[in-house]
Amino acid sequence: MFHVVEDTECIRNLVEVIIQRHGFETMSFSCSEEYIDFVNSPGYSRPVAVFTDVSMPGKNGYEMMSIVSRLKSGLKFVVMTGEPGIRSEYMNLACMYLGKPFTLANVAEVLSSIFRCHAFSPEEENGCCDSDSRKIFKLDNWSCPHRCSDCSSDGP
C-alpha cells in the first residue's frame, strides 16, 4: 500500500495509476489536512511510503511530513516537487525526491527503490541514491532519515 498526497488531480491520478500498474494498492488524498485527518483516524493503515507534493494550499507538504512523522515515526516519504530546491530544515524528513516534471519511468524507478528499502530494510544496498532526483536538487548534505547505508552523505 502506498499513499499519495497531491492537490493537482491529474498528477495524483497519474501517480496512483503507475503505482497500481506495478501491483500495489494506493490511497490518495487531495491535501495535507485530509491526510493528517486520515493518519489520526481509526481506519489508518501504514503504507510502504507516502508520495507527497510540497506546494499545496493550506499546510504544505513539508509541514504535513513534519506533523505525520511525529505521529507515525519511521514513515517513509517521497517528495514530488517542481520547486528548484528543498528547504533545508525539512530535507531529512524524506527518503527520496522526485522532480517535476517526471516521467513514468522516473516514478517506477523510485517506487521500486522505496519498495526494496521497505522489503529488505534501509541498511541493505538498494540503489536509492541513483533512483531519484536528489542530484538535481543539490542535496549534497542529505542523509536518509532511515540510515540507509548507501544513501548517507558519506556514501557513494
Image (cartoon, rainbow, N blue to C red):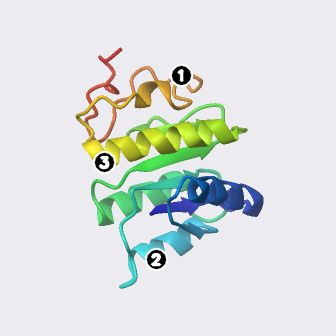
The residue at which mark 2 appears reads as 38
Answer whether labels 3 and 1 touch (C-beta < 8 Å): no
Q: Quadrant of the C terminus?
A: top left
Q: For this view, does 60 lie left or right of residue 101?
A: left
In the foreground, 52 or 45 = 45
Q: Quadrant of the N terminus?
A: bottom left
In the foreground, 134 or 113 = 113
Q: What is the spatial separation of the Cα atoms under label 3 and label 2, in whole angstroms?
A: 24 Å
Disc 2 marks a residue whose amino acid type is Phe
Disc 3 marks a residue whose amino acid type is Ala
Residue appearing at x 58%, y 68% in the figure: 28
Answer above or below: position of 143 versus 9.
Answer: above
Disc 1 marks a residue whose amino acid type is Lys
The residue at which mark 3 appears reads as 119
Q: Secondary structure at mark 2?
A: helix
**Residue 101, disc:** none
Residue appearing at x 52%, y 58% in the figure: 23
- Hey, which quadrant is residue 92 in on the image? top left
Q: For this view, does 23 lie left or right of residue 117?
A: right
The residue at which mark 1 appears reads as 135
Q: What is the spatial separation of the Cα atoms under label 1 and label 2, in whole angstroms?
A: 32 Å
Indicate the position of residue 118 as horizontal and vertical percent values: 32, 48
Q: For this view, does 147 lie left or right of residue 20?
A: left
Q: Secondary structure at mark 1?
A: loop
